[in-house]
Every structure is written in structure tokens, then in C-alpha cells.
Image: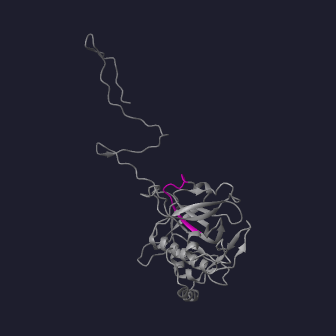
Amino acid sequence: MTQNIASDSTDIQIQNAIQHFPHDTKQALSYRAYAPHLASLHYQAPIKNKANGKSVYVKPYENCSDAVSILFCDTDNGDKPLRAPFGLMNPPEGSNNMDRKTLALTIENDQLMNFLETLDQRNLHEAYGHKESWGLKDPKGGPLPDAIVNVFYKSLIDFPQETPDKAAPAIPFKPTFRLKVATAGDYQTNVFVKTGDVALTDDFGNAVLTPTGAQVFVPVMRKGTFDELTKTALKGCGIIPIGKCSGMWFAGGKFGMSFQATDILILPATPRPQASFMFNGHKAQLVNSDTPTTTAQPPQSPIVDENSMHIDDEVQTFAG
């Protein structure tokens, strides 16, 4: 986000990108598939939103009515699932829409980081060319210098905050990006939870194989709830999200791009392996604490009368 996109080269990139853009824009594309086509994004004219503010809708390309819908975790290409270290966060107090919450997701690889940085650059390039219509004006009159526009822009990427002495991150988390989560309304976010995997078969019941001959498995999932997006519930879990671009927002002198999660798949945490305590060469067994257990006791010694040192033959011993 530190360098600007030259306008001449961008115009050429946009024309080339439109010619080669995937036609099925109704489906979510992975960020890797979208990366070559960011130059073709079309920023519509500003409109007045419900909060009496300003919004700019963004489409895959000009004259396209579909939304920009992105799969932010490309597991088919080896991506690690994302993490949500803070869980689902409420909007600030006084917000006019308390059902629109935020989920901060970790950036797990350089490719996703590069994608978000390039998208930041694309947004800034558009802002430089539409300062007047976007309301990016100098209070003293005239358009803002590009350097000031950069200051007012809210990046898609959040880096861990530094300590007061700037020595080290205050929170040892990876950089994150934000998705809005709608917990109610017509555009409520869908939450799913993976419950296992099933072998993929074709229409004739034959196993589907990879080019190397390995059997293909696909996840089985159930419908989830927003309670499963809390910080505690998500501990150790992975996240695969699909986000739809809501467009450019403008508020409090700042502006930026927002994405709303349309679908979230939670991958439950992998159970920790049982500890291997060894006794007499054998592994200790884990049992349900509610199950009664019988513990064998060593044979008791016969009772001895210390005064006479006489063994009481009538005393019986029991094992258990």
C-alpha cells in the first residue's frame, strides 16, 4: 500500500483484465483467482446510503451487476485455514446497527497478504481520480494531495499494535483483515461447522480420484450458530470464509472498503493427543469419570497383637 499505481499502465491492465475475466461472477472466486483481475474492478458513482452517508458500490467490471465475492482461504492450493483470535466482536456503542458485528481473521500466507495490499493500492488509485465526487477535499479548498488521501484511507490490513516504547507487538498475533458478520436481517451470514469427511463419488458410484490416484474426500457440515463464533468457542478452530464486497464506505473523515461474510465454515479444533503415562511398561488408560471403577488393592498383612506378638488367625484378608 506504499506505492501508487501509474494511471497509464492501469488503463491498459483494466482493458486486458476485462477481456480475460472469468464469466461466472455469480460464484465466489478464490483470492488467487481474483488477483489477476483486480484492475478491472468498477467503482460506481457515489450514492446516499440509509445512514445519510455516502457509499460507492464496487463490481467485478463495468456493466456487471454481480457482487465481488471472494473465497479468502484457498485450501485447494495448500492454504492453512484462517484463525479468529478475538472471536465475533460487537460494534461500537451507539451504533445504529448492532446486528452487524466484526470478525478479524489472520492472514496466514504471503499470497493473501499480497492480494490485500494490491486491493488497497487499487482503491487508492480510484480515490486519486475521484477526489471531488468522493468528497476528498481540502477544508481550505481544492482537492487533497495524494499523500493526504493515503492518510485518510483505512487499510484492509490490521497489524498488531506496538507497545508504547515501540519495542515489540503488544499482542503476538499475525496481521488480520476484517469481515462484517450480519447476525440478523435479509442478508444474515450463514455459519457452518465441519463434522467430518466423505469420499466423493461420480454419478455411477465410482470413487473420484486425483491425477495421482488418491481418493478425493469432501467435508460434511452442519448448520452452525453465532454462539459458535465466540472467542472461547473458536479456540483452536480454523475458519474458511466467503466475503462479498460491500463497497467503499466514508465516515468521520476516513474511508475504506468493507467485506461482509456471506458464508463461514468452522473447522473444529483437532483433539490433543492423550498423554502417554507409562507404568510397568503399559500405557495408562483414560476412562470416563462417571464410570465406576474397581481398583485392586494389595493383600492386607495379618493383624498382629503387639502385646503378645500373637497372629490373630481369625482375621481374613480381602483383595478388593
Check if residue 18 falls in the magenta segment: no
Front position in the image: 294 or 22:
22
Left-right relation of 70 to 112: right
Q: Number of callouts in the render?
A: 0
Left-right relation of 254 to 110: right
Residue placed at 65% from the left, 64% from the top?
252
Q: Is residue 267 visible?
A: yes
Check if residue 241 falls in the magenta segment: yes
Q: Is residue 201 visible?
A: no
Front position in the image: 65 or 251:
251
- 80 in relation to 141, above or below: above
The location of residue 212, given as percent across then percent down, is 40, 77
The location of residue 42, given as percent across then percent down, is 63, 81
Residue span colored magenta:
231-242
Dividing the picture into quadrants, the one containing residue 102 is: bottom right
Front position in the image: 167 or 41:
167
